[in-house]
Amino acid sequence: MKRFSFSADKRAAGVGRYHYLAMSGHICADLTQGALPAILPFLIAKYGLSYAEAAGIVFASNLVSSVIQPLFGYLGDRIRRPWFMAVGIMAAGAGISFLGICGSYTLMCAASVVMGTGVALFHPEGGKLARIVSGDRQGTGMSVFSVGGNIGFVIGPLYASVAILLFGLKGTFAFLLPTAAMSAVMLANNSKIKTLLTRHYEDKSKTGRACEPDNPKGFAIVSLLMVFRSIVGISLNIFIPLFWIGILFQSEAVGNANLSVFAVAGALATLAGGRLADKLGFRKVIVFCCCLTPPLMLFFCLNRHLLLATVTGMLISFALNGAHSTIIVTGQNFLPNRIGMASGILFGLTISVGGMFSPVVGWVGDRFGLETALFLLTALSIPAMILAFAIPTRRKE
């Protein structure tokens, strides 16, 4: 039987496909999350849902997913369960597929909860696999895995819109195709992935790295930093089109186009940031990106030139996303004995908390104006910069 090893030659020859397998799974898992907001207008039109009810469907999914992700990560750390990824992708696909045929609001929320549970099952194991198979290039590996989520969020709305326009709301069943196929691929590789993980922990034990202690304080600092950056990033996704429409007096099409530019720049920055972290050091990249964000945000708030606004938005996206995968790996490094739980918190809980704060930013915009809301986001980027300097220095990243 062939033994999996993390030597440079075997990693290059064999482990790479598991690297991209994790990324592909991430695409399919987040495909469902990205599609959910695009399905809501069709549900509102057919069933007469209020905006509050529509928001409740999204909230149900996000709440369940964020709360139970750390739990699934904890369970995965105790006993190796790579099949969580396959079951999670299938559950996410099934949940959003049945959303289109639910005849009652209760069943819609139930379908959304199933989807959120599936997403929560996938991310901790997926994040752990991405880290382990990356070997010494953890920044690059996690950036590739993370960009899979970006891709899923980008193509999810398009996939949902085309399916529903072709087949009506029952077209949500089209999500069973990619998720079932990806789930089958994951199951087919389950035993090999489990063997790979086992070999990793055996090698870790032999080299003495299994005794490396956890650093809860360092992990708490990284998690809080992620919360503040999530608030800024998620809120900007809401306000960027509104900025172009309400302040720069452009059309809705121009506003949405700039949101797409922001998303694409973020995906490229995620890939670039991981590679830079491997070369320059994780902490340096985090500090640089966190220090770059506040002045760029301030310039964005004050600027009224269209081209400069677009360029500044791209730079902000780079600053926010360039350190994303690096922050996740740094957090995992502070909990080396609980990588799954660390992944669940960083991929789920911290980002969801950021999303839950975005209505507060929206309330500020409604009450005091869009510019005030953007200045609030600028102020919220400052604590993240301070926390970046507070991250403990590790002997070896």
Image: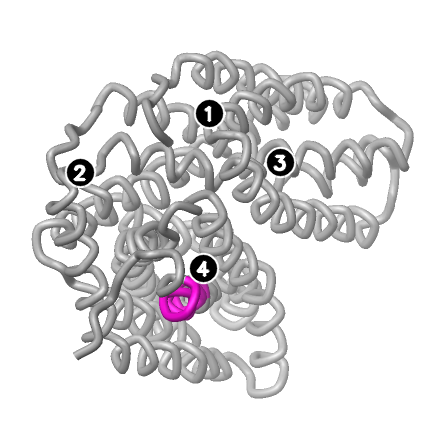
Q: CA distance from mark 1 to mark 2?
A: 21 Å
The residue that label 4 is drawn on is: 33
User: What residue sits 20% from the left and 60% below the top?
Assistant: 197
**Which label's residue is closer to the chain start, 1 or 2?**
2
Q: Is residue 16 magenta?
A: yes
Q: Nearer the viewer, mark 4 or mark 1?
A: 1
Which span is picked out in magenta?
Answer: 12-23
User: Amino acid under label 3?
Assistant: Leu
Q: Position of residue 306 (x, y in %)?
A: 89, 35
Q: Main secondary structure of the magenta part?
A: helix
Packing grade of label 3 (10 A; few <14, some 14-19, many >=20) is many
**Residue highlighted by disc 2:** 209
* 219 left or right of 77 in image: right
- The amino acid type, in three-letter code, at marker 1 is Arg
Q: Is residue 103 left or right of residue 114?
A: right
Which quadrant is the C terminus positioned in? Answer: top left
Expressed as whole percent of the image width and height from the top left, the position of residue 10 reads 35, 65
Confirm or deny contact between disc 4 and disc 3 (CB under 8 A): no
